[in-house]
Amino acid sequence: LYVSLEGVDQEKVETEFKPVSVDVKFHDVQGKNYRCAVPKLHQEI
């Protein structure tokens, strides 16, 4: 998974990988929060 977002510091990125899901959160990027989540993958990672 590759997610590109300008202006984000590494310490403000939170990732969580589970056997069948992935969740990436970006905190306080130019005053906003972003999230990219896939709650149910086709197979285990």
Image: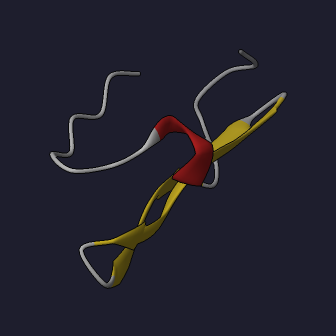
Q: Quarter of the image holding residue 6?
A: top left
Q: Kindly tell me whether residue 25 is visible in this rendering.
A: yes
Q: Residue at x 84, y 27 (%)?
A: 19
**Residue 44, how many percent across, how many down?**
76, 19
Q: Residue at x 21, y 45 (%)?
A: 5
Of residue 42 and residue 6, the one placed in the foreground of this image is 6
Q: Kindly tell me whether residue 13 is visible in this rendering.
A: no
Identify the residue at the far right of this view. 19
Q: Residue at x 71, y 15 (%)?
A: 45
Instruction: Name the side, left or right, on which 30 lies relative to 9.
Output: left
Of residue 13 and residue 17, the one placed in the foreground of this image is 13
Instruction: Name the side, left or right, on which 16 lies relative to 27.
Output: right
Q: Residue at x 67, y 21 (%)?
A: 43
Of residue 19 and residue 43, the one placed in the foreground of this image is 19
**Residue 27, how many percent across, how many down?**
50, 68
**Residue 29, how many percent across, how many down?**
32, 67
- How many callouts does the rendering have? 0
Instruction: Name the side, left or right, on which 15 lies relative to 17.
Output: left
Identify the residue at the far top of this view. 45
Above or below 10: residue 29: below
